[in-house]
Every structure is written in structure tokens, then in C-alpha cells.
Amino acid sequence: MFRKLIAPTLVLALLAGCAGAPPPGDTSAADRATIDRATDKGTAIVDEQGEKLICRREAKVGSRLARDTVCMTQAEWTRVSEESQRETAKAITAVKPKQGT
């Protein structure tokens, strides 16, 4: 019984880790400092196309304390969220427990 629970737990953990954060962009240290200051003050950041960016601090994978600041447009955040929900639902439905055991 214990072995049957290991695989579904590992699948969910891997999917949550992969879908939880987008890959980091290529930004210089000065850009990151500017983004951090704007995020701390609640200042809006606008990208090259004139779209407002929403910045969030997310836990860095593999660390309990380190954080990464991730900035994306609302449409990008929505896409990432929906993709994460789809992958999680797929993982849950793929591993159905046997009834009556």
C-alpha cells in the first residue's frame, strides 16, 4: 500500500514544482534592483510594449528562504495559472485509487 502512494505523491510534487514558476528572464543586476524597489513600493512597471507588469516574489525552488521576483503581464499570469491548474488536474485524475481495498 505504501508503494502505491509514493508514485502519485512524486508526480504531484514534480508537477507543482515545474508548473509553479516560469523560467527566469535574462535581467541585469541593475534591472533586478529597480524591479525590487518598484515591487516594494507598489510602483507600476511598464514593459517595452506599454503593458503593465505585475511582479510577485515567489519561493525559490530548493530554498526555504530565498525568493525570486517574477514580473509578467496579467495575461501571462493568467496563462501560467491555468496551465498549472490543468496539469494538476491531469495528475490527480491519472492516479485513481482502487475502490474497495
Image (tube, rainbow, N blue to C red):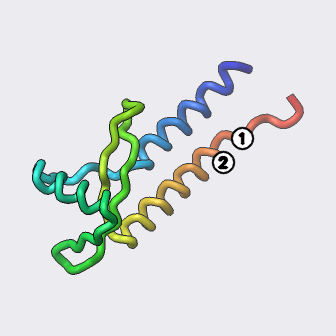
User: At which x and y percent is residue 47?
Assistant: 20, 72
Q: From this viewpoint, which residue is outermost toward the front? A: 41
Residue pictured at 18% horizontal, 52% vertical? 32
Q: From this viewpoint, which residue is outermost toward the bottom? A: 50
The circle drawn on residue 41 is none
Q: From this viewpoint, which residue is outermost toward the right? A: 100
User: At which x and y percent is residue 3?
Assistant: 66, 20
Residue that badge 1 annotates: 96
Residue pictured at 44% horizontal, 48% vertical? 20
Mark 2 surroundings within 10 Å by alpha-carbon count, few (fewer than 14), some (14 through 19), many (20 or more): few
Pointers 1 and 2 in contact (C-beta within 8 Å): yes
Residue pictured at 34% horizontal, 52% vertical? 22
User: At which x and y percent is residue 23?
Assistant: 29, 49
Q: Is residue 22 above or below residue 12?
A: below
User: Which amino acid type corresponds to the residue marked 2 in the rendered image?
Assistant: Thr
Number of residue marks: 2
Toward which corner of the image does residue 65 lie, by quadrant? top left
Residue that badge 2 annotates: 93
**Is 28 positioned to the left or the right of 100 in the image?**
left
Separation of marks 1 and 2 at Cα, in angstroms: 6 Å
**Is 2 positioned to the left or the right of 7 in the image?**
right
Kind of element beneath mark 1: loop
User: Which amino acid type corresponds to the residue marked 1 in the rendered image?
Assistant: Lys
Q: From this viewpoint, which residue is outermost toward the top? A: 2
Mark 1 surroundings within 10 Å by alpha-carbon count, few (fewer than 14), some (14 through 19), many (20 or more): few
Toward which corner of the image does residue 8 lie, by quadrant? top right
Q: Is residue 2 above or below residue 64?
A: above
Kind of element beneath mark 2: helix
Residue pictured at 19% horizontal, 78% vertical? 49
